[in-house]
Amino acid sequence: MLFGANWKMNGTPGEALSFLAEMKDRGSRETDADLVFFPPFTLLPLLAESGKEAGIELGGQDLFWMDRGAYTGEISPGMLMDAGAGWFIAGHSERRHVIGETDDVVRKKLEKGLESGLKGILCVGELVDQRERGLTEKVVRRQLESALDGLDIADASNLVVAYEPVWAIGTGLTATPDEAQRMHSLIREWVGEIGGGNVSPEELRILYGGSVKPGNAADILSKTQVNGALVGGASLRAESFSAIVTSIPAEG
Ligand code: 13P
């Protein structure tokens, strides 16, 4: 299992350091699950040591597809690595729908990040009106095709997909565990068909994201197709993030 704490544009240095210290106190080193913390970029260097102590890896919430140059406001994979990150997120719904990133931009970011040796989480998911118009499958398949078709990944285990239905993010609404199971199973099948660079669908980790909380995590994580969660709001406090991590079903 893999759990990501995506803090989005939240958190002070003190809050992030306390989060890692508290996660450690709550046993983050002892879990078999992989844990990754995605704070704002500016906090990454400060957290490198505490992350190691807590057994929690660090990641950037985004990256750019060039190594250096005149790209005001952007951050390169090398800069992320220098800052202590081993992971990045590509195509988070807030970047797609608030900032306006296209499928093409997401593809370039994913490709560059993976090529650079970082591990990447590709986010996919439909908007509420797409869901209501019965377009969920079409939209998610298109997002996967655009990101993965012909992608050459040296180490396929570096790719993780997160299914985050946009209507479930920050709203308190979640896909039912059965809906998540169904979509994850389709995503696995499609990734097998699209066949991006050596990715083995059986081994691909697919996370669910969207209002995951301590109260609903166990039900979602009990589904065989769900390999972890990408958590926003409930990751801001170690108490709730750690409760989500420890709600893995016994055999998980
Ligand atoms: P919430 O858990 O706040 O719904 O956010 C989910 C998310 O966007 C994680 O990347």
Image (cartoon, rainbow, N blue to C red):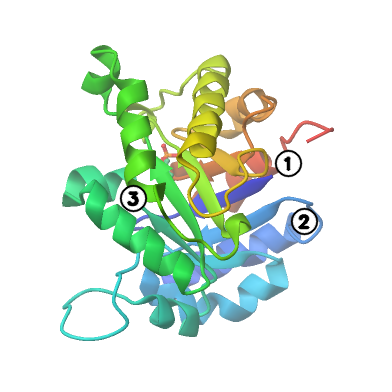
The answer as to whether callout 2 falls within 8 Å of ligand 1 is: no
Q: Earlier in the sequence, mark 2 or mark 3?
A: 2
Q: Earlier in the sequence, mark 3 or mark 1?
A: 3
- Vertical placement of residue 55 versus 147, above or below: below
Residue 91: image tag: 3
Structural distance between the alpha carbons of marks 2 and 3:
31 Å
Could you say whether the residue bearing mark 2 is in a helix, strand or loop? loop
Q: Residues within 10 Å of mark 3 (few under 14, many from 20)?
A: many
**Residue position for label 2:** 27
**Residue position for label 1:** 246
Q: Position of residue 248 (x, y in %)?
A: 73, 36
Most foreground residue, 169 or 95: 95
Q: Nearer the observer, disc 3 or disc 1?
A: 3
For ligand 1, which image quadrant applies?
Answer: top left
Q: Name which residue lies at 83% across and 33% down.
A: 250
Residue 73: image tag: none
Q: Earlier in the sequence, mark 1 or mark 2?
A: 2
- Vertical placement of residue 13 versus 189, above or below: below
Could you say whether the residue bearing mark 3 is in a helix, strand or loop? loop
